[in-house]
Amino acid sequence: MPPVGEPGRGLRVALVAAFVVTLAALQLPAAVGAGSPSRLRERAQELRSENSSLEQQAQASWLSSATLSTRLTQTQSALGRLRARREAIAAHRAEAEQSLRMARHTLTVSQSRLADRLRLLYEQGQSDPMSVLVGATSVDDAINRMESLHRIAGLDREVIDAAKSARARLTIVTQRLADDEARARETEAATAATLVALEAAQREQAARLASLRAQRSANSSQISTLESRARELAATPSAGQSGRTLTVLATGYSLTGHTSSGVPVGYGIVAVDPSVIALGTKMTIPGYGEGVAADTGGAVAGGHIDLWFPTEAEALAWGSRTVTVTLH
């Protein structure tokens, strides 16, 4: 598959096919009007063979289109899943970034409070245990002050440590989620591009299938016309051939005896293929003169005629040449 076609190409294929079919239809009367019944039947058979090939191509095109349709459905489903996954990753990343901002804020506030508390203790002269003991009014008061000092300092350290740990962990998580989201976007974009290519290929196959069917229809119509004309010519050979010109290969010969129709050989006797030129047809042969189709031969087939000469020398002098005869 693949590139599987640019936009608009399928439409152009269909238009070209329609033009070809129309042109063939316009040329059909001239093609049918010329030729012998056997040639018309040969042409009809050629068109049947062509239709058989077109049918095979149409079948292959239909199968390809069905395969493309399946792939298209699968790709559409995959794109939906990828889009949902990318959106979920984006949501988790947003949550992680919010938590990271909160952890950073907590760390900043805790560090600021600890600094303020230490500065206050220093200003009050209670920055060491001895100062606390000297300033106490009793042993219990001293113990309570010492415990309070250690407890507050411990809590501040716990908050700061937890905030630092959360900040480090959330930094890693948000980076990983950002990487995951970037990869998900790339995969989604590639799948979307594949979907566009498959849709273009499907349109191309549909246009090709329509073109093949149109050509087969035109051929079938032409076959019918050719066979009808062949029957008409076979029924009225003289009327069908009168005044018609025909280009043939004419060969000279010189034999004694009688023709296949029973008449004796003589000047003007022409051997023909009856399926091309009916026996009894008169004709004018350039360089030879007037003749009549009154003989046949095993070597005389299609557009080939034999001309009788009284001597072998004259026959050899004529040899074989292409001439355009006029049938009467």
Image (tube, grey):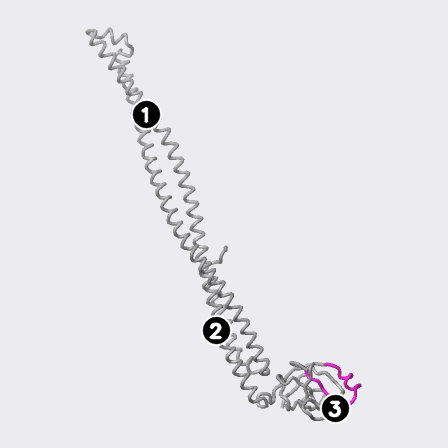
In the image, taking residue 233 as reference, residue 169 lies left or right, namely: left
Location of residue 185 with respect to 267 vertically, above or below: above
Q: Can residue 46 be seen from the camera position used here?
A: yes
Q: Secondary structure at mark 3?
A: loop
Identify the residue at image location x=37%, y=30%.
Answer: 169
Circle nearer the viewer, 3 or 1: 3
Residue type, label 1: Ala
Residue marked by disc 3: 257
Mark 1 Cα-neighbour bin, 10 Å: few <14, some 14–19, many ≥20: some
Q: From the image, which quarter does the C terminus lie in? A: bottom right
Identify the residue at image location x=52%, y=70%.
Answer: 52
Q: Are marks 2 and 1 in contact (CB under 8 Å)?
A: no
Q: Can residue 12 be seen from the camera position used here?
A: no
Residue type, label 3: Gly
Q: Secondary structure at mark 2?
A: helix
Location of residue 216 with respect to 176 vertically, above or below: below
Distance from Cα at disc 3 to Cα at disc 1: 126 Å
In which quadrant of the rendered view does residue 50 lie?
bottom right
Residue marked by disc 1: 162
Location of residue 104 with respect to 301 vertically, above or below: above
Q: Residue furthest bottom?
A: 263
Distance from Cα at disc 2 to Cα at disc 1: 81 Å
N-terminal label among 2 and 1: 1
Pick the residue in front: 259 or 106.
259
N-terminal label among 3 and 1: 1
The location of residue 6, given as percent across then percent down, is 48, 58
Residue marked by disc 2: 217
Q: Which residues are magenta?
A: 304-320
